[in-house]
Image (cartoon, rainbow, N blue to C red):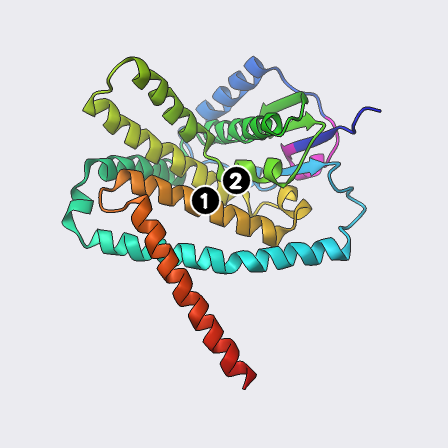
Amino acid sequence: MAPPRKQLRLGSKTGGNRRRTRPGFTESIKLASARAKVCANRPANRRHHKWVHASIAGAVPAEESPHIALRMFRWLLAILLIPLAGVTSWTFFNLFSSAALDRSFWASSPFWYFATGALLMVGWFASGLLWNFFLYLYVLGHELTHILFIRLCRGTVSDWGVSVDGGYVTTDKSNILIALAPYFVPLWAALIVGIYACVGIFVDLSPAAMKSLYGLLGFFWTFHLLWTLWMIPRDQPDLRDNGTFLSLMIIYVANLLILICLTCLASPDMSFQGYAREWVVNAMATADATEKLVLRAMR
């Protein structure tokens, strides 16, 4: 018996889980370009995209709720992630602030090019210029990330589609990793790194090429972060289906770890070994403080 088909969907609220006609890939590109040209010289109509969201149709039927034991397990797991998120955030901000006091941090070329790319994306996002084009690019990356992780989990994809109004992937397999991967995997930034790595196998990359790499990483990682933050509040069934609290904790920790990796690569004042050592020290301090609070409360 063939396994049931599931749809990972990113679309409008009124569309629900119904199947809709999918425009061709070329047609979608032309549609996005046309809309981008219309919006290029005026403020973007962001109100139109208020209900763009992602969901996994079939993972949990709309008329049913997760069993109480499953809901409690998800809450417990999310609560257990809070100390991990707290210690990781504390360690990162401590090391970042310490590195910022050192002039070599601000003078480092990788940091400045990364920061320049990030600021360009922030300005572009705030201005609304080519809003629909970037929305289409985000939706495309979202669905491609779903597809990538479906393949990694040995699932099959029978259909998929992308447009500025949403997208979907029809698959026979879904799990929390497949559902949440687009929220913490910066696909376009990873693709840029892959291209540079492949080119670097055959030729030596010049300093100018490496500087452009840092700038592109800052641009596309910030693109991923801004659009993810814009998308999450818009009623995401992906998050509800796996427990909103747990999903948000996983997304936060995963994105924080990626930011730490990028910062360690861009700054000569921060290293993975130094971060790991500091994290262990802070974790032990947190455990000691928690133990004292518990003992004091039990008296």
Q: Residue at x 78, y 29 (%)?
A: 4
C-alpha distance separating marks 1 and 2: 8 Å
* Front one among 276 and 195: 276
Kindly tell me whether residue 152 is visible in this rendering.
Answer: yes
Which residues make up the magenta segment? 9-19
Q: Quadrant of residue 13?
A: top right
Q: Which mark is residue 255?
A: 1
Q: Residue 246 placed where, x, y %?
A: 60, 52
Q: Residue 183: which disc?
A: 2
Q: Earlier in the sequence, mark 1 or mark 2?
A: 2
Quadrant assignment for the N terminus = top right
Determine crowd level at label 1: few under 14, some 14-19, many 20+ residues with C-alpha closer than 10 A: some
Task: Check disc 2 and report its element: helix, strand or loop.
Answer: helix
Whether residues under marks 1 and 2 lie with C-beta atoms below 8 angstroms apart, the answer is: yes
Amino acid under label 1? Asn
Residue 101 lies in quadrant: bottom left
Residue 5 belongs to magenta span: no
Residue type at mark 2: give it. Tyr
